[in-house]
Image (spheres, rainbow, N blue to C red):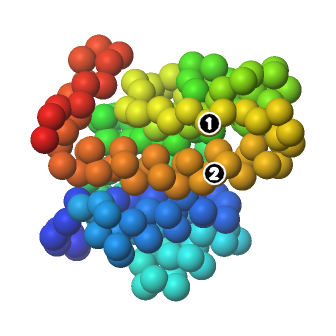
Amino acid sequence: MVHRRNKFRLGILVSGRGSNLQALIDASKKKEIDAEVVVVISNNPKAFALERAKKHKIPAIAPPDQSEKAFINILKQYDVDLVCLAGFMKILSPAFLKAFPKKIINIHPALLPAFPGLQAQKQAFDYGVKVTGVTVHFVDEGCDTGPIILQSPVVVQEDDTLGSLTERLLKEEHKSYPKAIQLLATERLKIAGRRVIQRKK
């Protein structure tokens, strides 16, 4: 069964509490983005993100079969236009990327290519940078190496702790992810090599 479309359809992959998922749901409800979350899938059946989805009557699935094939089948069943990683703690294989070419994005709490991988906030804080930020990027076969859609800087304050910096980065994530999705939903992006070019309205 294929679910019929009316808006740009988002499939969200999650592993944890899902604060970015909530930001996307809220942005959709407020009509800040021309997109809707149509399915949430997790590799962790205890992820709080699934409860967030259920609260908004969005299908929330932690398939017993945790194979990539099962995830791909669910996303195709819901006829998604874009796959969004929101704290999804699993590396996607080339086969998964091939199933959704240029249709998988991620948000990262640092200004890539600096501080890729896990605990990016801590990496930046420990390094002593004066400015960090968040990056929304397409997913490719590397670790946080895909073409960059947008970046938002966050200034590190002199009295910042890792906790306070992480909190401000998260707030910026909640703004940046919907912005990037709106650009995709309104077909305002073009990929040229590693560059993602924004078309004018």
**Where 131 falls versus 79 (above or below)?**
above
Alpha carbon distance from label 1 to label 2: 10 Å
Evaluate whether residue 190 shows in this view.
yes
Packing grade of label 1 (10 A; few <14, some 14-19, many >=20) is some
Name the residue nearer the viewer: 185 or 91: 185
**Which element type, helix, strand or loop, lies under badge 1?**
strand
Residue 51 higher or lower than 32, as above or below: below
**87 displayed left or right of 124:** left
Q: Mark 2 points at which residue?
A: 170
Earlier residue among tags 1 and 2:
1
Spot occupied by residue 197 in the image (x, y as percentages of width and height): 25, 25
- Give the residue displayed 29% in from the left and 69% down from the top: 31
Relative horizontal placement of residue 146, taking residue 191 as reference (left or right): right
Q: Quarter of the image containing the N terminus?
A: bottom left
Q: Which amino acid does label 2 sit on?
A: Leu
Q: Where is residue 9 in the image (x, y as percent from the top left)?
A: 27, 61
Label 1: which residue?
A: 154
Give the residue at x 58% y 27%: 111
For the point 29% across and 51% down, the residue is: 182
Of the pair 58 and 98, the residue shown nearer to us: 58
Label 2 neighbour load within 10 Å: few <14, some 14-19, many 20+: some
Label placed on residue 17: none
Q: The disc labelled 1 sits on which kind of residue?
A: Val
Res 139 visible: no
